[in-house]
Image: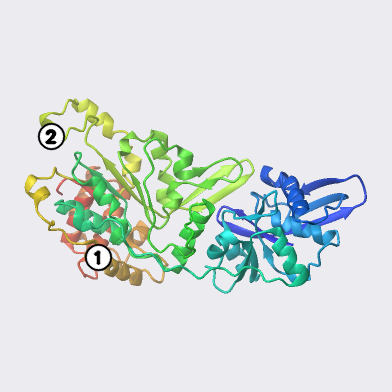
Amino acid sequence: MLCVGLVGVTGHVVEVEADLAPGLPAVAISGLPDTALHEARDRVRAAIVNSGQRWPNRRITLNLLPATLPKFGSAFDLAIAVALLGGSGELPLLPLERVVVLGELGLDGTVRPVRGVLPMVAAAARAGLHRVVVPVGNAAEAAVIPGVRVRAVDTLHRLVGFVRDGTPLIEPPDPAPAEGAGGPDLAEVAGQALGRRALEVAAAGGHHLALFGPPGAGKTMLAERLPSILPELDDDAALEVTALHSIAGLLPAHGHLLRRPPFQAPHHTATVAALVGGGSGLARPGAVSLAHRGVLFLDEAPEFGRGVLEALRQPLEHGRVQLARSRGGTEYPARTQLVLAANPCPCARPAGDTYCECSPLARRRYLGRLSGPLLDRIDVQVTLPPLRAAELMEAGGTGESSATVAARVAAARRAAADRWADSGWRVNAEVPGPRLRRPPWRLPERDTRELRGRLDSGSLSARGFDRVVRLAWTVADLDGRDRPHAEDVREALQLRMGDGA
């Protein structure tokens, strides 16, 4: 029988072999199974007997090929049960030739849904296998993959009836209508012209963003509305995001691809494993991977553990997470936009310096929890001023809606995608710095004079120099220019340094 095993988000077709030989009744499983697979012998036996089938009292050897590939989870149960029934002569397996069978078995013979069905079915399709049998709870998810004929089962008895008598299997449900954009709107944010501009530039170029300022200035409101101005995911990105949520068991039941950019906002008590992924056996994706092609928001960022924050440096730089475990390594995509929000000091008095009880040293120590190397990877860093009463009480607000800003962001992203189409980069934040320092993309010296001065004085690192140039290209894209000018570089430097440069 054919099944699929997952290593990270990559699926591999697995052949399930069953050999029944004379001898003392026993079941041996080979092929690097994990604990859940070792326990399959008891689940499968109970499911076969309770489905009205005869258990073969012989020496049974189960082999999962390729034997060098680690196998995780209970998705092999149904394939093992069918292989055993075929090996004992109870079931003719010709109707299931070149059919991938997935599912976990309950003791009463019910077929229960499993995690990761979408990347499993995608791997089967890439291997040229276009017929799959999945649990009825995963049917809508599996049907997302084009060109694959999906059938579902709710019990082992139903699958046996299909093989023996041709009893029809369950058809997957019709796809549910796609959900609308919904969510909070940027028009609800009072004032904060600088914060709005920073959010728009970050969205247009895929840049990381840090928002500093007193409580109530709108840091969290702005961050939560970033997904509302991002373009919908294309087919490839939607498949990546949906596959990650399928592995994590967080996929909604409606069955269609996730088109809206995901938003993850872990609590500040989150561990390294919760943020970047981890766990025994097969490491599971963390929040940074679940935010792939979307937004990872760390509110009250200085309250996170220092090790947790430092663990983000490699994913931010390379767009992927590599997790090494004793049983093998796992890699998950992590091309996310990081948004940090921080108060200026631990007491965070809303009145600012007037009533603040923190010493200058306490303030420096508090914000010093955000290390220099981490902040150096944040393209946009702005300090928001406190809101004024006139801005807060203005009826209806004066800010633009998310739909209006999203239209400009989409146009800027199209311009960047057309410019870098030959290289495969989607947004300006993905372009390597050396590419922008060489002709024909190198900016004239007259436009980068102030930027060069910052680099020579040491107030800006070489990485920061490249990030300011990327920001300048994004500003130019938003304003409809084909190349950045001096004013674009100046605005990019202000957004980077947050000091009115």
Which residue is labeled 2 in the image?
351
Q: Going 24% across and 71% down the picture, which residue do you hit?
A: 482
Mark yes or no: residue 437 visible: no
Tell me which numbered mark, 1 or 2, is placed earlier along the sequence.
2
Q: Going 64% across and 71% down the picture, which residue do you hit?
A: 130
Q: Going 21% across and 70% down the picture, which residue do you hit?
A: 480
Residue 403 disc label: 1
Q: Position of residue 202 (x, y in %)?
A: 28, 56
Residue nearest the viewer, comparing 52 with 113: 52
Place residue 187 in its image quadrant: bottom left
Amino acid at the residue labelled 2: Ala
Residue nearest the viewer, comparing 169 with 498: 169
Residue 72 located left or right of residue 348: right
Q: Position of residue 125 (x, y in %)?
A: 61, 69
Place residue 214 in its image quadrant: top left
Residues at marks 1 and 2, CA–CA distance in whole angstroms: 33 Å
Residue 23 lies, with reference to residue 88, above or below; the image says above
Quadrant occupied by the N terminus: bottom right
